[in-house]
Image: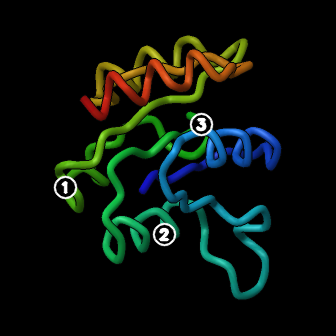
Amino acid sequence: MIGILCRSTYLSSFIAERSGQGAAVLPEDRTASGMMPAKNWLVSCLTERDVSVVLYEPRYFIDPSCFRQISPKTRFVVLSGPGEEAQAKKAMSCGACAILAKPVDERDLEGVLSLVLG
């Protein structure tokens, strides 16, 4: 299963549909009454499910190390858009294993998933 933390419903759906795996997608309204903030949602997913890859935007977090402590086998991929290059580089230095540039196309997604899933 993959986890997706992305503010774009379209991009989340695109990744989920083309990943070839089950996907847990951050709920669109993650901070409204009854919903958990993004980091808590991810901790819950990593604790309760077998998540092999998390694709995330740097607006949610930069350093995946606290999540890797919960799920050491999970790989983290940064979804980086224009203007987010510095955050993506920092995420890589903190333990993210790849950067997937937005806009995402199917070949790039397949390539990154193939790379991180081996």
- The percent position of residue 91, horizontal first and vertical second, equals 40, 26
Quarter of the figure with residue 93: top left
Q: Secondary structure beneath disc 2? A: helix
Kindly identify the amino acid type of the residue bearing the numbered disc 3: Glu
Specify the quadrant that holds the N terminus.
bottom left
The earlier-in-sequence mark between 2 and 1 is: 2
Which quadrant holds the C terminus?
A: top left
At x 78% / y 76%, what residue is drawn?
32
Task: Please state which of residues 71 and 86 is positioned toward the viewer in this rendering.
Answer: 71
Q: Residue at x 46, y 62 (%)?
A: 42
Q: CA distance from mark 1 to mark 3?
A: 19 Å
Above or below, 92 relative to 8: above
- 1 and 3 marks in contact (CB < 8 Å): no
Q: Position of residue 110 (x, y in %)?
A: 50, 25
- Give percent across and percent down for residue 16: 62, 48
Q: Secondary structure at mark 1?
A: helix
**Residue in view at x 61 percent, y 75 percent:** 36
Q: Give neighbour class at mark 1: few <14, some 14-19, many 20+ (Cα, 10 Å).
A: few
Neighbourhood count class around disc 3 (C-alpha, 10 Å): few under 14, some 14–19, many 20 upward: many
Alpha carbon of mark 2 to alpha carbon of mark 1: how far?
Answer: 14 Å
Q: Is residue 71 left or right of residue 28?
A: left
**Residue 35 horizontal side relative to residue 3, left or right:** right
Three-letter amino acid code of the residue under disc 2: Asn
Disc 1 residue type (three-letter) = Gln
Question: Which is more N-terminal, label 2 or label 3?
Answer: 2
Q: Is residue 92 above or below residue 33?
A: above
Among all residues in the image, which is located at the extreme bottom?
34
The residue carrying mark 2 is: 40
Task: Out of 39 and 27, give the one closest to the viewer.
Answer: 27
CB within 8 Å, label 2 to label 1: no
Find residue 57 and name its label. 3
User: Which residue corresponds to mark 1?
Assistant: 69
